Amino acid sequence: MTIATAYGDLTALSGDEVVTHSYVRDVRLPSGATIALITLDNDRDHTRPNTLGPVTLMELGSVLDAQRDRGANGEIAGVAITGKPFILAAGADLSKVSEIPSTAVAKQLAQLGHEVLGKLDDLGVPTFVFINGLALGGGLEVALNANYRTIDRGVPAVALPEVFLGIIPGWGGAWILPNLIGIENALKVIIENPLKNNRTLKGQEAFELGIADAIFDSANFLEDSLKFADGVISGSVVVKRPNVPGKLERAVKWDAAVGIARKMLESRIGTVAQSPYKALDLIKAAKNTDRATGFAAEDEALSELISGDQFRASIYAFNLVQKRAKRPAGAPDKALAKPVTKVGVVGAGLMASQFALLFVRRLKVPVVITDLDQARVDKGVDYIRGEIDTLEKKGKINGDESNRLKALVTGTTDKADFADADWIIEAVFEELGVKQDVFAEIEKHVSDTAVLATNTSSLSVEQIGAKLAHPERLVGFHFFNPVAVMPLVEVVRAPSTDDATLSTAMVTAAKLYKNAVITTDTPGFVVNRILAKLLGEAMHAVDTGTPFEVVDKSIAPFGLPMTPFELLELVGLKVGAHVLDTHHAAFPDRFFESKNLHDLAEHGQIFERDAKGKVKGFDKKAVSIVKGGKSPMTGEEILRRVEDGLADEIHRMLEDGVVEAPEDIDLCLILGAGWPFQMGGATPYLDRVGASERVFGGTFHTPSIRGME
């Protein structure tokens, strides 16, 4: 039986696969030996990274079989694989993986990867992979399956990101890596890094961990790698791998490290996401299983995850972030955008200073901040310059850039210094009258073409601009905290906002390295409106007599990074009370007001914490404040209320045109509220659990996005 026949169900899915071919040429080594050099490249689209679909894998398998025969005949002394310039491979072809119709076919994909890449471990001659560029997921697993690896010092990204996408490294990575670089290093690469916003390794970092046996500069990388291979083949080079785990690590450290990682996962992400725990189980078992057993376990785990809801949701979320976020719905022509050559920031507090730091670092234009008195201004400028110094100390910028950025930041109490600013953003108290007066005053000093931006989180942008002579140049520009880290900006178009202003806001957001979603001018916009619904239902349950613990546990199926009451403490209880009040005023029939929340805000906390800030339990005074409710709910009742409430609110938002599509809602939640990739945002989840059908008799998405039924 041929490999194509054995994996016929996969072949049927691959009619339009962009095939990454395996091109072979013989290279004569200095010793006189010959090595077969396989270069991976997709000749249909040279701008697209190499990816590994079923046809690609089958072709590579056939090429490797041919080299096995050549090695047995003495024609070649080794086999090496490298990639086209700057790219080894970006992993499996996710478009093909997401089309897999069943667990059985998913298992075929896992087995095909193992069968083909596994040939590199037993080809009869030494095998090498020269990691010349990007090596992600299955691309890195190509290298891990080989006998030896070299890496280019300039490689920008090496990673196993599968856990981030709701699956596991299923072509050998989960078994090989811990046995190659040790348990703690493997946990970092397979679990910790993907959950840190998909962190990747540079070439030097990968070498230091032991992923590669040798590292060379880019200029002569291929030549030096071939010399290394020649040395290995001839015996003049002996490879030492200091991070390979020994008996003591396997006996003592291995299980302890896995146990610590499990506790870390439970505290950080809860237990809803499946892939990190599946990966952890595989890594733990790799301590004392052989390669075949480890690969078989990967087959089972990968096939189960590929055919599950969380992978479908993860791919949906991945496509939102990689594609939709880069082409924002409703954005005007970029050509309409006004140039931004100077920025004014109204306010010098922490949030305003974070704005100023971001603008000066990304736009590299003069930034002036203002406040009520010189002491506050000086404090803000000192903070910004101190943060620039910190960036220099961490090696993120050099001394020259540090000096240039600090010179661009100034402070003033005279708003006339904003006269030549093209962009002015406020970060003052969240009170309508205050913001109205600020902009009315600023407008007296700025040019007619200057854009005015408000960072309001829930107030009406239209009302904020009520005192402006030119409200058409006012736009909402809502950041999320911490400003430097959170990737979302909600760009709010008020009824008067013109296209030039909106275009300027969108172009500016992109230059700040932020993903912008356009919303209409409605209370809470997207993120805060949905969180207000969630938090409002949580407080309503407590107000009616449900214990804090029951409410917190009831929301666990959403897989959110923190419970409702942890979120309330994070944003600030007074801010949370203000947001709920704003939404109750706007939608009194759907959003609850809570006197208890105001009393909790006065008290200052919900949780009791130790000296390090770790939660010990619910604060006794907080529990006393909310006592008195006579109608407690069960966890199941609360979950149903929250699910149905969110389905109703999101459906209303879409009917009212707050954003263009459900995808924009989910993009906002993923980028602005930390909604887990494995959940795909809110709308696929609400479809899966039947809330959409219960509430409005339909669904937000087709079954392929919701997950396998």
Image (cartoon, rainbow, N blue to C red):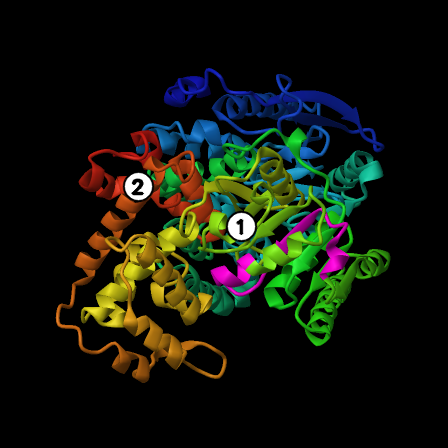
The residues colored magenta run 415-436
Residue 609 spot, x, y in % from top left: 42, 80
Q: How far apart are marks 1 and 2 (CA)?
A: 26 Å
Residue tagged by mark 1?
465
Confirm whether residue 573 shows in the render: yes
Count neighbours of disc 1 (C-alpha within 10 A) and say few if under 14, some if 14 to 19, many if 20 or more: many
User: Which structural element holds mark 2?
Assistant: helix
Q: Which of 649 and 42 is in front in this view?
A: 649
Among the two numbered marks 1 and 2 on one chain, the one whose residue lies closer to the N terminus: 1
Q: Which mark is residue 652?
A: 2
Q: Which amino acid does label 2 sit on?
A: Arg
State the residue lying farthest toward the left: 630
Which amino acid does the dot numbered 1 rest on? Gly
Q: Quadrant location of residue 618?
A: bottom left
Tell me which residue sits at (44%, 82%) in the image: 610
Q: Percent position (x, y) of residue 525?
A: 43, 48
Q: In which quarter of the image is the N terminus?
A: top left
Where, quadrant-wise, is the C terminus in this rendering?
top left
Is 689 colored magenta in this rendering?
no
Say which quarter of the image contains residue 339.
top right
In the image, residue 655 above or below residue 2: below
Q: Where is residue 694 in the image (x, y as percent from the top left)?
A: 18, 41
Q: In this view, does 348 lie above or below 48?
A: below
